[in-house]
Amino acid sequence: MKNVISLKDLEQMVRNGQSLNNLPADSIITPSAREFLQDREMNPGASAAVATAAPTGKPTPPSKPLNSKSSKAELEAFFASPYAHSLKEQICEMGHRLWKRAYVDGNGGNMAIRVGEDIAICTPTLVSKGSLKPEDMCLVDFEGNQLCGTKKRTSEILMHLQMMKRQPKAVATCHCHPPYATAFAVVGEAPPTCMLPEYEVFCAVGVAPYRTPGSADMGKLVAELTDQYNTILMANHGVVTWSHNNIEEAYWRMEIIEAYCRTIVVAGQLGKPIKTFTGPQMKDLLNIKQSLGFVDPRYSMKECELCDSGEWRPGTSCQVQGNPENAVGYDAEAEKAVQAITDQILAQMKA
């Protein structure tokens, strides 16, 4: 039986340092593998740019930083390198977790990892995250142009790229549709705060208005929130997160916000008042969060302002310390009138 050589086989040979010049003469070469061989014949120097494994066996990034202006040979060699392969495997692993947790359905969801000044590895379109394979991945520039990969890049890549453009710290992005968190996105409301420490430390949640998925306008509105939020509810759509560390941390935020949203929905059905953190307790959590390098718009707030959850319960306001007459907007005559009316109402109730 004749051997069938696929693109995956050739990429593995490159990673192992094997020559591609001595393939069995009677082998059946798939179209994508044949195209790969032809490209390498046209760019014989490509193999020299392949990243090598470190002595420990852990793949290392290329010594020469890459960008969209790098040669085709350099980009293809990088895309077939052990380092790029390890990132592809990480994306696949996160995709499988998303699918197993029912955070995605059909071919929904997408992810990206920044791998150069203006290039990123991303998931393909029309592929279930439950069946992702490393050879499915794509390499794109920050304008959305596909540079490498046999499958077409995700249709929502512009959002990921605009997030990375706007937020230089963003190394990885993850988008999916976890049901409970997406329910909050459907009503256009960020979850109430000050209830669980993991949520407060790892997530800072903003809400972006709805725009057509995949459009530049949608990406722009989401990207504008990345300065202050690392977890963004996309109205009537889903959730997208970013991390300054790795794709797994971006995925963790999906687990955390989904568990949090589910917990508070259940807690609201128990018929008991929901207990929240005090201002000092919340400040302690924000100090931890800031030490980890995570963004949050509440760092400059006073303790008494930290647990205002809008429609979920009455908002808090800082109490004036000392003489109330020193408060901005204080009106002595108005206060007397309010007190007089209150006294009359109480007197009528007692009569």
Image: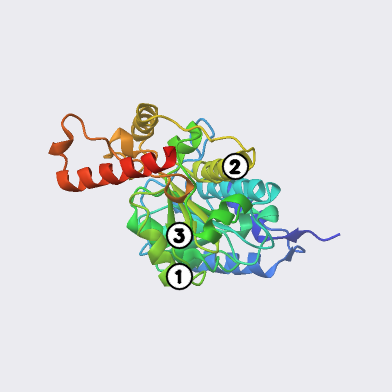
Q: CA distance from mark 1 to mark 3?
A: 13 Å
Q: Nearer the viewer, residue 342 or 194?
A: 342
Residue 276 at x, y percent in the picture: 47, 33
Q: CA distance from mark 2 to mark 1?
A: 46 Å
Can residue 43 be seen here? The reply is no
In the picture shown, does residue 323 fall above or below 211?
A: above
In the picture shown, does residue 260 fall above or below 174?
A: above
In terms of sequence position, does the residue under pointer 3 or pointer 2 come before the other? 3
Question: Which quarter of the figure is the N terminus placed in?
Answer: bottom right
Q: CA distance from mark 3 to mark 2?
A: 34 Å
Instruction: Name the residue that disc number 3 marks.
Output: 160
Residue 319 at x, y percent in the picture: 26, 35
Instruction: Name the residue that disc number 2 marks.
Output: 268
> Which amino acid type corresponds to the residue marked 3 in the rendered image?
His
Q: Is residue 230 left or right of residue 327?
A: right
> Which amino acid type corresponds to the residue marked 1 in the rendered image?
Asn
